[in-house]
Image (cartoon, grey):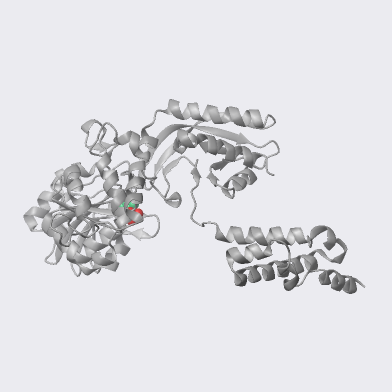
Amino acid sequence: MLEVELAACLRKIPAINQVLTYPGMAELAEKYGRERLLQEIQRHLAELRQAIIAAGPLVAGDKVDLSFAGICVAVREALAKADQARLRPVFNATGVVLHTNLGRAPLAPEALAAIEAVAGGYCNLELNLNTGKRGRRYDHVRELLQILTGADDALVVNNNAAAVLLILTVLAREHQVIVSRGELVEIGGAFRIPDVMALSGAQLVEVGTTNKTRLADYAAAIGENTRLLMKVHPSNFRIVGFTAAVAREELVSLARQRGLLVVEDLGSGVLYEQSGSGDFWGEPSVQSVVRAGIDLVTFSGDKLLGGPQSGIIVGRRDLIAQLAGHPLNRALRVDKLTLAALEATLQLYRHPQQVVSHIPTLSFLLQPAGRIEARAREVAQILTETHPAWQIQVQPGMSQVGGGALPEVELPSWCVVVRPPQGGAHALAERLRTGEVPVLGRVVTDALWLDLRTIPPPKLAEFTRLVVMAMAPG
Ligand SMILES: *Cc1c(COP(=O)(O)O)cnc(C)c1O
């Protein structure tokens, strides 16, 4: 008996041709193409069929919408959804300023303008406008990098991992490279110094121990086939306690005596020094590393520098020339969008009074906590007004630099803490994450923590609206 009823129920599903005659379908066929529309209708009808079978004939009528309007809306929404961009802007309220999963450094307005200026048309990417002859794409940022870092020359590749791979491949293939055991780091996303070394064809020679490496350890390991001494900045961890590492100057002088090169993978690449201190919260600046005499220094463009993804190499001219001329450099090269954004970002560093306020990464890191608190209070007040039954608090929290930089630095910040009345902080976090503009926060036990450090004032109203909407789901 049930089978008969089920069959009767399934027969109520309209045929594709019937659906095609519904009002609005011609318009959809025009917009998305007839083929795609047919596929979508077919998919939706198959779904309805499965839903009826799953619900059973007795309740299917209540649960499955077979109306014209229901089918039209579902098909229209599915088509629109498929056309939505997969890569979308999100709000980062996690408290991690350089979040690799969220695209690391947001670009300065000047960098965006530079991309826009060259992206839609032609540009002098590899043309020297003075001579009318072929130029090099790196020339657009070379002089700026020379001025800002004090290095003789510069090259830019896809990212810092690429920069390290290029150097090891070109300068140390089939030769030995000496690295301290305390610096055999893994950076997120499968960048491990020993693996990159193997890929390049260079032979890793480990010296010292995890916590202590001395100059004598390097000296004793140097052999006939040694080409490079390499220093790797322990970006994302710190070894504390009974430790020793060799100063750059000492390593440089040992290398000079023995006719070797010294290379440093600096990771973050700080250009902004706090009051000429040579560092930024203890992170050595690129300038200070160049001054110490390191032959080649590599760093990321999208970490503390606050620019686009790129790997920047600065150092000795003859070595940079070798790197630039190698076929691997061709495979790792950067495009015009990156160069435009990088040039504009580097230009900002030539205006020390303005650099912090213009580069989002720096302004997020260096803003006074009082300003973050003021924004948190503003948001909390609106949430309290719209949702009197919810527990909304403003609480101090700790933000992190992120991006594998300054792991031990905790930045005092302010958060809006939202506690749904009947639990469900995870459900709230999910609604925020899957909303029209996703908002990412942190769930701690039964509350959602939203760190306001990386929500800039012009975006505050939209951010608040999204949280209000997610608190009261449609
Ligand atoms: C981040 C980092 C890398 C990788 O840089 P990408 O630009 O992400 O490729 C390599 N080495 C160190 C020390 C780093 O901190």
- Name the residue: 48% across, 48% down: 89
Image side of residue 20 versus residue 263, left or right: right
Where does the C terminus fall, quadrant-wise? top right
Evaluate whether residue 18 shows in this view: yes
Image quarter of residue 177: bottom left
Q: Camera-side residue: 39 or 391?
A: 39
Residue 171: x and y, percent? 17, 64
Residue at image point 60% right, 65% down: 30
Give residue 63's position: percent from left, percent from top: 80, 58
| Left or right: 343 in relation to 380 | left
**Against 360, is 254 above or below?**
below
Q: Is residue 50 above or below residue 317?
A: below
State how many labels appear. 0
Question: Where on the picture, by quarter, is residue 349?
Answer: top left
Q: Position of residue 5 (x, y in %)?
A: 89, 70
Q: Residue furthest left?
A: 257
- The quadrant of the picture occupied by the N terminus is bottom right
Give x and y (percent) for residue 41.
68, 68
The quarter holding residue 446 reads top right
Relative depth, front residue between 77 and 398? 77
Is residue 297 visible to the viewer in this orientation of the structure?
no
